[in-house]
Image (cartoon, rainbow, N blue to C red):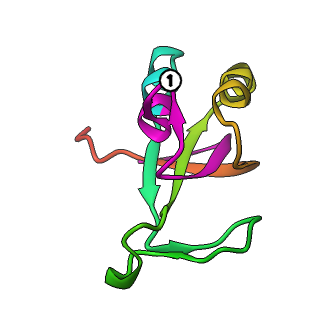
Amino acid sequence: MRETVVMKRLMIFIDETDRWHGKVLSAALVDRLRKEGCAGATVVRGSAGFGGHQKIHTASIMDLSSALPEIIIVIDSAERIEAIMPTVEEMVAEGLVCLDDVEVVKLSKKPG
C-alpha cells in the first residue's frame, strides 16, 4: 500500500568542526530535535565540498586537517519544522539552512 503526503524538508549545512556547548554540533542538533518531538533526523557527512568562504574541504589523506561538510536532514510537518526553527537559529552560528516542500511516499508491506 502506498500513501503520499506533502511535508517540509529542513536541511542544515554545517561542518564537522562546529560545536554547541563543547559538543559536536550535528550530534547536539540531533539530540535536541529528538527531544523537541521531530519525526526523525539524519546526519550525512560529505567527502568534499566548499561553502561561502570558497575553501575546498576534502577527505583526502593530504588534507587531514580539513573540516568536512555535514548535512542534517529533517522531514516533518510544516508546523513541527516551524516550531523547531528557533532552536536551529539558536544553535547554528554559521551555516546554511534550506527549507522546501517535499512529497513523501510512505510504503507499507504489511499483510492484509
Residue at the (70%, 24%) spot, across then down: 90
Q: Position of residue 12 (x, y in %)?
A: 63, 47
Structural crowding at the residue carrying mark 1, measured as other residues with C-alpha within 10 Å and reported as few (<14), some (14–19) or many (≥20): few
Give the left or right position of residue 86, taking residue 46 as reference: right
State the extent of the magenta-drawn residues as a range: 1-29
Q: Is residue 42 above or below residue 83?
A: below
Residue at the (67%, 30%) spot, across then down: 88
| Quadrant holding the C terminus | top left
Q: Position of residue 67 (x, y in %)?
A: 49, 61
Q: Position of residue 37 (x, y in %)?
A: 51, 17
Tell me which amino acid carries mark 1: His
Residue at the (26%, 41%) spot, across then down: 110
- Report the residue marked by disc 1: 21
Q: Nearer the viewer, residue 86 or 93?
A: 93
Q: In the rendered structure, does residue 51 fall within the stretch colored magenta?
A: no
> Residue 10's quadrant in the figure?
top right
Q: Is residue 72 above or below residue 36?
A: below
